[in-house]
Image (tube, grey):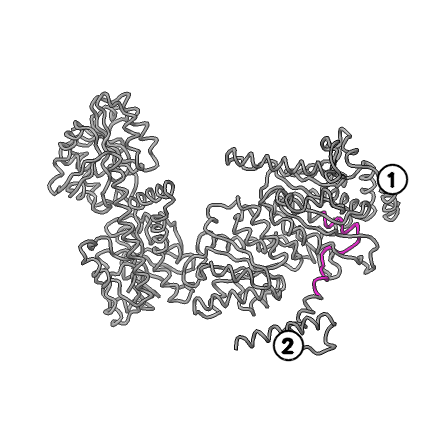
Amino acid sequence: MNKHTAWQRLEQLSREQASVHLRDLLQAPNRFEQFSFRQDELLLDLSRQRLTTETLQQLLQLAEHSELEAWIAALFKGDPVNHTENRAALHTALRLPAEATLLLDGEDLVPQVQADLQRMHDLVDQLHQGQWRGFSGEAIDTLVNVGVGGSDLGPMMVCRALEGFQPAEARHITTHFISSMDGSQISGLLDQLDPARTLFVVSSKSFSTADTLANAATALDWLNRASGLPTELLTKRHFIAVTANATRAEAWGIPAVNQLHFRDWVGGRYSLWSTIGLAIAVRIGMSGFRALLAGAHAMDRHFRQAPFAANLPVLLALTEVWNINFLGIHAHAILPYDGRLAHLPAYLEQLEMESNGKSVDRQGQPIAHHTCPVLWGEIGPNAQHAFYQLLHQGSEAVMCDFIVPARRYSDQGDALQSQHRLTIANCLAQARVLALGDAAVDQSNATPWQRYQGNQPSTLILLDELTPKSLGALIALYEHKVFVQSVIWDINPFDQWGVELGKQVANSLLDAIGAPVHSGQFDAATEGILDQLHRQLNAEDDTQC
Amino acid sequence: MLIAIWGDELSAWVAAAELARSGNDILLQQPAPGESSHRAEPGLMDGLENGLQSGRIRLCTHAEALQAPWHWLASHPSDLQQAEALCQALCRQGPDELVVINQSNFGIGASDRLQARLDQNRGQTLVCLPDTLQQGQALQQFAAPETLLLGCEDDRARLRLQALLRPFSSRLQQIQWMTRREAEFSKFAISGMLALRLGYINELANLADRLGVDIEVVRQGMGSDKRIGQHYLAPGCGFGGHHFTQYIEGLADILTETRHSTLLNTVLNENERQKELPFRKLWQHYQCDLLGRRIAVWGCAFKPGVASVDNAPSLRVLRALLAQGARVQLHDPEAMQALQAELGGSADLTLHQDPYSALEQADALLLLTEWPQYSSPDYERMLHSMRNPLIIDGRNLFEPDYLRELGFTYYGVGR
């Protein structure tokens, strides 16, 4: 057997099982034991997926024949798995314990990582002790993370998720996140902040991200106007750069002492573990941050060592490959049943769609099958009042991830604990109805519009408790799942060429906004709208005169 | 009269020394105060020593102490449980008709709770005598108070108490008798009022800084109004001390918990900011960079006359200076040891026995405590010693115009 035949065998299986409904599969008494898998504080329940033992065996065959084992080794070893940019993707190195070694081009990365962490630790201590001083000498009490994409979504998601883990010394510091290019976040926020006590963390791997630099420039201008002090002094006291491009950051005005290194071998959407996570470390302290890394590292070890048949990232990836490529499901909903994970859907949208939203293979050939589905999500209980209608009775097949902690509010009284039980009940109910449809209850008297088809597959991830460690493991689970899928699909998950062209075209359009249009400059649609803009913007100028 | 002393607060030790001096027999269970700042209270150790030598003060066991007819209780605010246990033990083992004088800051209502542990049917009574002693002059204040607030709800105890306090009434103008709860509340109210005055004048001083007005002139003007008066209106770099802060924090907590009021919390938070004012002035003067600067500091005690740095502005200022890589040259006549105990050793902090040696090559002098000996220094010598003649006067001790004429750069608080 080779990869091709394994694929064909799965196609055949999917045809054979076309009429199998989840309500039938769920009748098997040992279904849960067979299709749920535990790793430390995390339980992966695939029993509501349209899997049979045979399918799973065959999917594992597909993994074997895709040389997954070799690819995993290459990933961890620092091979240039990001071949289009000739780079390693070593986010896993950021999570290695201090005593480990990892050679890349003959150089041990671990001391570098530890040194970066130590620099971060010093900054965090300074902030926590109230000894990072602004221009007036007041201690900084507000941190504004300026970044976009991976420099925003990861830190924001984790800060929100782990709010409850703020140590006492961190409580006097408030954190805000600013990403949008149009200035709508920053303009509203600055009105509420005291310039003397605000520190901006400008996170950009290249230090050329237009969105981020535009926001940083607005922040600097605000500080200039409030203090009347020279730029050089303000950048020194009110800006930290997290970047791989020290020269550009310095040219912008941020001195080397205020810079944290962002290593070249870390991708943006895999970077919350790096110095990009400064906002996280300020929020939950360095010990919390290290626990987050330890949780991810435990998942890394599991991913490297566990046999595929018990390997959570592998099993999750293969299950979704089955859904996408053999059951024709191209929509994926992320549904955390815990408000603290509010930003997880947005985070995973980037992680999955920017990684695997590709349609040429590693050789540059077009791919004949589907790759990453459309991903979206929302806090589950809120989404119940929004788009669950479509999940239950719409015409689209959708796979869902339910994510819920078993324990919450253990030290906070009965009222909140009963709210949590209500939330778990809702989570389980939705998963059950999606799978069983009408068979979940007695529906014999239901009208046609009260009917539920069911058979929508879902994954349930049960965390013992949401902690820095379990969150680290959860995120690493998704990261590795994405990687496994990329191996099966033979694509490079670590580049993002698809985001480049738009930036380039925007640059060429910038001067044309508000200017008279010359025919033949762009396409008809763009020229038409440019003409409209020209009239409207100039009319406005006239009225101002 | 035979009086057992309980607790390790300053007022316990002052009471022991002073009550022994006026002829009472005092029972102690430890020979000296645990806290060094208490041991440094002027006259206290001599007073205790005299008492011990004359036999008026003697050491005894816990069981012996319980037998005394009088009990003076001045414990730390966190020791309420122990105080309750004590009252319970007195109820079981103590004599009839005993009087407990509670001077501890346990919060409003605590004295009533303690009374409830005693056996009222056997005439066991608890009286609340709020502690109004100020560190540095505690013995004189105990010996000759001008007013006394007494929370006492038992007529016989009142008579006995008047007898006990008689030797200390030479300057007494008024004894206010009230309920225990009212006495506790009054003490809180007084502390809060003083804190509000200090907070207010500091707020005005900071504004005066911005508006180019001399706050000292404004303060004279305010103080001449009889409704306001001169007390507690000196602007400066914040108040400290152990006792005062404890009461205000206690009252701020009650106000927050029961009324969601932020009035006193605001005062406390602003006071913490005010403590760093000298640092901020220095920071701005040197354009946000103090690395390697030599900074002389005169005074680290939380007020003149004490060897204590409890909640002192100097702690915050020195931490900030050291965190910025400045080299601090400190002089204080009494509190340097306490400061070192609090901050730990640092290569960037040197302690000087002579104020002028602290000024050697200094880029600035920060005056944080208005010890009298700093009031009229040898300015020529200062100019000669310092690398940069910059003075940041956190207590408005010096005369700005004169100093500027001499060639100093001078920053005060609100002037």
User: Which type of secondary structure does the marked residue at label 2 adopt?
Assistant: loop
Residue visible at 67% across and 50% down in the picture:
A348
- Viewport quadrant of the N terminus of chain A: top right
First in sequence: mark 2 vs mark 1: 1
Q: In the rendering, at what x and y percent does residue B263 appear?
A: 34, 49
**In this image, A259 relative to B352: left or right?**
right
Callout 2: chain: A
Tell which of A532 and B263 is nearer to you.
Answer: A532
> Residue flagged by tag 1: what amino acid is it?
Glu
Q: In the rendering, at what x and y percent does residue B394 appear?
A: 30, 59
Q: Is residue B35 above or below residue A535?
A: above
Q: Is residue A497 magenta?
A: yes
Q: In the rendering, at what x and y percent does residue A353 appear?
A: 71, 54
Residue visible at 40% across and 57% down in the picture:
B322
Q: In the rendering, at what x and y percent does residue B320 appear?
A: 40, 56
> In the rendered image, which residue does mark 1 sit on?
A16
The magenta segment is: A481-500
Residue A111 appearing in the image: no
Q: Quadrant of residue A256?
A: bottom right
